[in-house]
Image: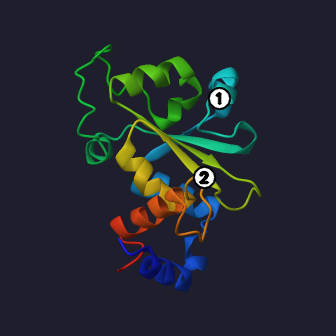
């Protein structure tokens, strides 16, 4: 790819690639049928030890269980055939307080859930979105939250190159 051409296009629309928390929450709830799980239900120790998220910046967590959305973002190598629970879709948004870390792990292993963590540094805009359960969904979410560690504007930075690739792949930039 010619990253110089993509960077020029990116710079024209750069302001459009900052998303508010509200905008991303609307995408998650309306388009992806996600529902919020209270962070208090998750293991604080595991979240603090997770190298992919910055604990102090985690704002909210959303879970996707909608079968059509799961199918859309299922990674082709994910079909491992595990089914640990016959009650595949036994949680709903109105039961979110019963959803805990162990339940989430089981649902991820069964491929019956994907999770999205919203991070923010300013409590207004998204600084990063981390996805558990789907690389395809992670690619899309990086268009809304960037890639952690990227050197924005540096076309020699592999993280920024990946970010530009994802913007093109998902139609955010037309090249």
Decide if residue 77 is on the left or right side of residue 35: left
Residue drawn 42% across the image and 56% down it: 140
Q: Nearer the viewer, residue 94 or 123?
A: 123
Q: Which residue is mark 2?
A: 128
Q: Does 171 sit above or below residue 22?
A: below
Q: CA distance from mark 1 to mark 2?
A: 15 Å
Q: Determine whether 74 is above or below 87 in the image.
A: below
Q: Is residue 74 left or right of residue 137?
A: left
Secondary structure found at label 2: strand
* Quadrant for the N terminus in the image: bottom left
Q: Residue at x 53, y 65 (%)?
A: 156
Q: Nearer the viewer, residue 68 or 135?
A: 135
Q: Residues within 10 Å of mark 1 (few under 14, many from 20)?
A: some
Image quarter of the C terminus: bottom left
* Image spot of residue 90 (x, y percent): 38, 24
The residue shown at (51%, 34%) is 94
x and y, in percent, of residue 114 in the image: 42, 37
Mark 1 = which residue? 47
At 59% from the left and 57% from the top, the residue drawn is 150
């Amino acid at each position: 790819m010619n990253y110089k051409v993509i960077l020029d296009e990116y710079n024209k629309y750069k302001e459009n690639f900052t998303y508010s928390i509200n905008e991303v929450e609307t995408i998650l709830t309306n388009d992806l049928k996600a529902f919020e799980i209270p962070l208090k239900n998750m293991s604080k120790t595991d979240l603090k030890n997770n190298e992919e998220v910055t604990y102090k910046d985690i704002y909210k967590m959303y879970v996707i269980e909608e079968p059509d959305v799961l199918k859309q973002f299922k990674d082709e190598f994910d079909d491992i055939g595990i089914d640990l629970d016959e009650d595949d879709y036994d949680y709903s948004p109105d039961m979110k307080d019963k959803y805990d870390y162990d339940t989430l792990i089981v649902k991820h292993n069964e491929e019956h859930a994907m999770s999205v963590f919203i991070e923010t540094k300013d409590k207004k805009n998204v600084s990063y979105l981390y996805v558990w359960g789907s690389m395809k969904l992670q690619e899309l979410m990086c268009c809304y939250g960037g890639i952690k560690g990227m050197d924005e504007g540096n076309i020699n930075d592999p993280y920024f190159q990946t970010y530009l690739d994802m913007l093109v792949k998902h139609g955010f930039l037309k090249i």
